[in-house]
Amino acid sequence: MATSELPSESDAFAFPCRDDDGTSTALSPPVVISVLASILERHIARNERALATAAAPGDDADGSESAAAATRKRVRAFDSGTVLDMSLHAFLERFSRYAHVPPQVYVVAYAYLDRLRRLGGAGVRVVRANAQRLLTTAILVASKFVEDRNYSNSHFAAVGGLAPAELGALELDFLFLLQFRLNICTSVFRSYCRHLEREESHGGWYYRVQRPPLDRAQHRQAAAA
């Protein structure tokens, strides 16, 4: 999937929740959260089956801090050895309720997780042991990319059940694993929205979650309308 390598002013960093004519959209948090939780549950089941049959990569024989070893170390930082004491749906819903995370942030966070999976050398997979840390960090980073104003890291840490210092370190690991490729261009955003739409329509319903990001000037005009 083609992506823009560098952020540009033509790519938006805000995702308004209404159409260009000012009418509201059906871009509701419950729909996005439900669909995304279902997708992640399937990913986790598939990833854990694959891990059960795959040999775990070892450290470099000479103990050197090569690029590959550093990447594995960052990936292991997300493994907590514990699992969430709630469903993924309830966990994602916490961020909407207590951090007011809009649907577009969830879409971008999902794109980041997919990007981590695809990046060579990282191969980060969501499993039970890393879901809490990985999802909290992905939502934090996506919120900073999408929103002009955000809650503090300590607030996100409290919502995600992590210590503030721990989340700060995980954020840095997340950025390095992504190779600081945070930009999500309009076409990529739309493709992930269409994917969520297809998932929801397969369940017998259809909600329009596709809303391309607008540039900052368009966002201000829409907000003033």
Image: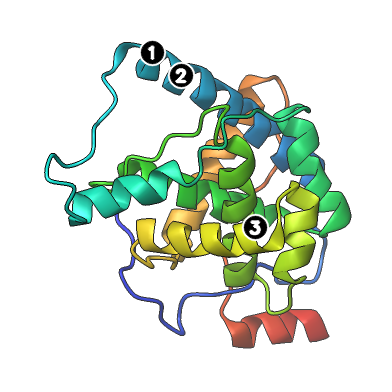
Q: Secondary structure at mark 3?
A: helix
| 74 up-or-down from 143: above or below | above
Q: Is residue 202 left or right of residue 77?
A: right
Q: Is residue 78 above or below residue 186?
A: above
Circle 1: element type: helix
Question: Does the rendering let one see residue 211?
Answer: no
Q: Quadrant of the C terminus?
A: bottom right
Instruction: Name the amino acid type tagged 3.
Output: Val
Residue beneath disc 3:
105
Which of the 4 quarters of the picture holds residue 19?
Answer: bottom right
154 up-or-down from 209: above or below:
below
Q: How far apart, in angstroms, are the residues tagged by discs 1 and 2?
A: 6 Å
Say which amino acid is labelled 1.
Ala
Left or right of 22? Residue 119 is: left
The quadrant where residue 153 appears: bottom right
Question: How far from the left and from the top, in percent, is residue 205?
Answer: 73, 26
Of callouts 3 and 2, the N-terminal one:
2
Which residue is found at the position 71% from the left and 50% from the top? 162
Q: Residue 190: percent from the left, percent from the top? A: 51, 53
Q: Secondary structure at mark 2?
A: helix
Number of on-image labels: 3
Residue mark closest to the camera, 3 vs 1:
1
Q: Which labelled disc corresponds to residue 48? A: 2
Picture disc at residue 52: 1
Contact between labelled residues 2 and 1, with CB atoms less than 8 Å apart: yes
Residue at point 63%, 55% (across, down): 139
Q: Camera-side residue: 107 or 207?
A: 107
Rendered residue at 65%/67% (across/down): 15
